[in-house]
Amino acid sequence: MVPSEVLRQAKILVVDDQEVNLELVQDVFESRDYSNVITCSNPLHVAGILNETPVDLILLDINMPVLDGFGVLSLINQKFSGGYKPPVIMLTAQNDQSNRNKALNSGGNDYVMKPFDQNELVKRVELQLENWFLRKRLMEQNQKLDQKVRERTKELNEANLEIVQRLGRAGEYRDNETGNHVKRVSLFSYWIAKQCGLSEEHARLIELGSPMHDIGKIGVSDNILLKPGKLSSEEFQAMQNHVLIGAKILEDSKSEVLKVAYKIALTHHEKYDGKGYPNGLSGKDIPIEGRIVAIADVFDALTSERPYKAAWSVEKAIDLLEKEKGKHFDPDLVDCFVQVLPEILKVRETYFEA
């Protein structure tokens, strides 16, 4: 139940072209301690009133010149098309079933005949107001619940992203301390994906999945991973197995993120000309996720300092990407990378490592 004092604070808009009718309705409700009754004698002003003042119920006459009650009701329906519409009670002196049906079918909540019984009118208004306030309360509770769900979902997504990034770092730290490498690669990949026309959802999945690209390094021997000199052919083959190990770790997941991560882990060392590993895929046979991360990973590796090399300049790294178009890299995706270079540089600045 809604407390009576709440009902009496309701804002009621009365629309009728006859001033005498407006005064009568206003007196009826004010005599019962309703203190927020608004009257309008010009139906063309209703839209302006609703824009400026939230109302809880509308008493609407049907027979009015210029714009009748059904026309006003249509405007009200449009005004509240995106949310909850306050109840509308139609008032008319025409006692015919077709008008009643039209009023209810057009979005009216009730229908009262003139001359009306004052007690009946008040009771009908109070009934509609009770329903209205209960609906509003439910709507507010649902909005609070939706907000909590959104906040909780955001927290879970952030936690999942952090877990993925930290697992990605686990693979990176096996052979060198690259710190923010996985963050940079994931954001580089996002911008390339957006520029090449992938949807926001797909681009975000690539961003979320790419930190796992080298997770398979946790299965490679330290003797190989930490060897300071050049690897033998057998050692290099063992090193290449990290993509298969990573794919094995990530395969058969129901998670959309991990499905994308699986593709990336398995294919980010494939080359556009078919000379990569592990399966020698070429061109568009390489999943786009792997083609995108290949560019992001190589660019970040080139422009980052390592114990065994100095960092390349951005210009020198881009020159290499351009030279490797159609060989190591998808030429269209290299062009996309260059087109989003301002965003790439912002990411590097944000996650820079001295």
Image: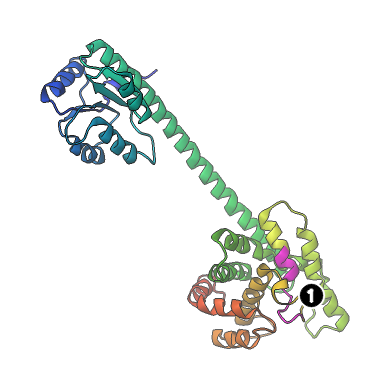
Examine the rendering and report whether any part of residue 299 can be seen: yes
Relative to 183, say whether 338 is above or below.
below
Residues drawn in magenta: 263-274
Question: Which quadrant of the rendered structure holds the C terminus?
Answer: bottom right
Residue 42 position by quadrant: top left
Judge from the rendering whether residue 125 lies leftward or rightward of residue 276; answer left or right: left
Q: Nearer the viewer, residue 253 or 305?
A: 253
Judge from the rendering whether residue 325 lies leftward or rightward of residue 24; answer left or right: right
Q: Which residue is mark 1?
A: 225
The amino acid sitting under disc 1 is Leu
Relative to 139, say whether 161 is above or below.
below
Q: Bin the neighbour count of mark 1 within 10 Å (Cα to Cα): few under 14, some 14-19, many 20 and up.
A: some
| Residue depicted at 26% across the width and 35% down the height | 71
Residue 74 position by quadrant: top left
Relative to 307, say whether 190 is above or below.
above
Residue furthest to the right in view is 234
Question: Residue 298 appears at what percent x and percent y?
Answer: 65, 78
Question: Residue 153 appears at what percent x and percent y?
Answer: 56, 47
